[in-house]
Amino acid sequence: GAVVSQHPSRVICKSGTSVKIECRSLDFQATTMFWYRQFPKQSLMLMATSNEGSKATYEQGVEKDKFLINHASLTLSTLTVTSAHPEDSSFYICSQDASGNTDTQYFGPGTRLTVL
Amino acid sequence: SQKIEQNSEALNIQEGKTATLTCNYTNYSPAYLQWYRQDPGRGPVFLLLIRENEKEKRKERLKVTFDTTLKQSLFHITASQPADSATYLCALPRDSWGKLQFGAGTQVVVTP
């Protein structure tokens, strides 16, 4: 299957700072990537769809100005949590389709964000 | 609204037995259903996809059934091993472009 990496795997920051999370496709090009968030003991919740070369589309209730997504190349999408607050502490996971086959997705290993 | 329900209670099972997990959904007519495995602190790993016109699908020790009338999928792990201990998530497509909606998952604990 496809290999997706995320960096960093863990980040701890102070309230009010911004944090950038990278999602890379290591073995094929992805025109679409998805960003999910998962709180403890809860399901993954889709935050936004990242489209290469165009603006991301956000799910209802997700603030686009707070969660900035950039998909500048076919192998890299970034999620920036701006002015992070403790309630933003969560597990952020990206995923991508398998070579345009939308039936199968491959997920990154996730990034644990802790905002103090 | 669309809902996916999985048993929130952990499933404790002895090694060698079959673990059976349930995924029920409402207000959906999905073209397929997926099962994923998630280990603590890790992203989900794709296991199986079953389409609406398929009743059953197998992959090694895994078996999935899909009943579109009951709106239910069953996930079986046969001859379970301690290494199978993880949380198992079911997911349904929200659209034809790859967006998924996940259940909360069921934790499986296999004891030797």
Image (cartoon, coloured by chain):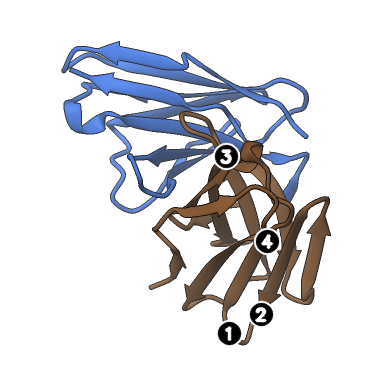
Chain colours: A blue, B brown
Q: In this view, does A90 lie to the left or right of B101?
A: left
Q: Residue B76 carries which label?
A: 4
Alpha-carbon span between mark 2 and mark 1? 5 Å
Nearest to N terminus: mark 1 or mark 3: 3
Alpha-carbon span between mark 1 and mark 3? 26 Å
Image quadrant containing the C terminus of chain A:
top left
Nearest to N terminus: mark 2 or mark 4: 2
Question: Residue type at mark 3?
Answer: Pro
Q: Where is residue A44 in the image (x, y as percent from the top left)?
A: 44, 46
Q: Which mark is residue A51?
A: none
Alpha-carbon span between mark 2 and mark 4? 14 Å
Nearest to N terminus: mark 1 or mark 4: 1
**Crowd class of label 3 (few under 14; some 14 to 19; many from 20; radius 10 Å):** many
Residue matched to label 1:
B70
Q: Are the two marked residues, 2 and 1, in contact with CB atoms closer than 8 angstroms?
A: yes
Question: Residue type at mark 1?
Answer: Leu
Residue matched to label 3:
B44
Question: Residue type at mark 2?
Answer: Asp
**Crowd class of label 4 (few under 14; some 14 to 19; many from 20; radius 10 Å):** some
Residue matched to label 2:
B67
Q: Which residue sits at x=23%, y=20%? A: A115
Question: What secondary structure is found at the residue carrying circle 4?
Answer: strand
**Crowd class of label 2 (few under 14; some 14 to 19; many from 20; radius 10 Å):** some
Nearest to N terminus: mark 3 or mark 4: 3
Q: Which residue sits at x=65%, y=57%? A: B34
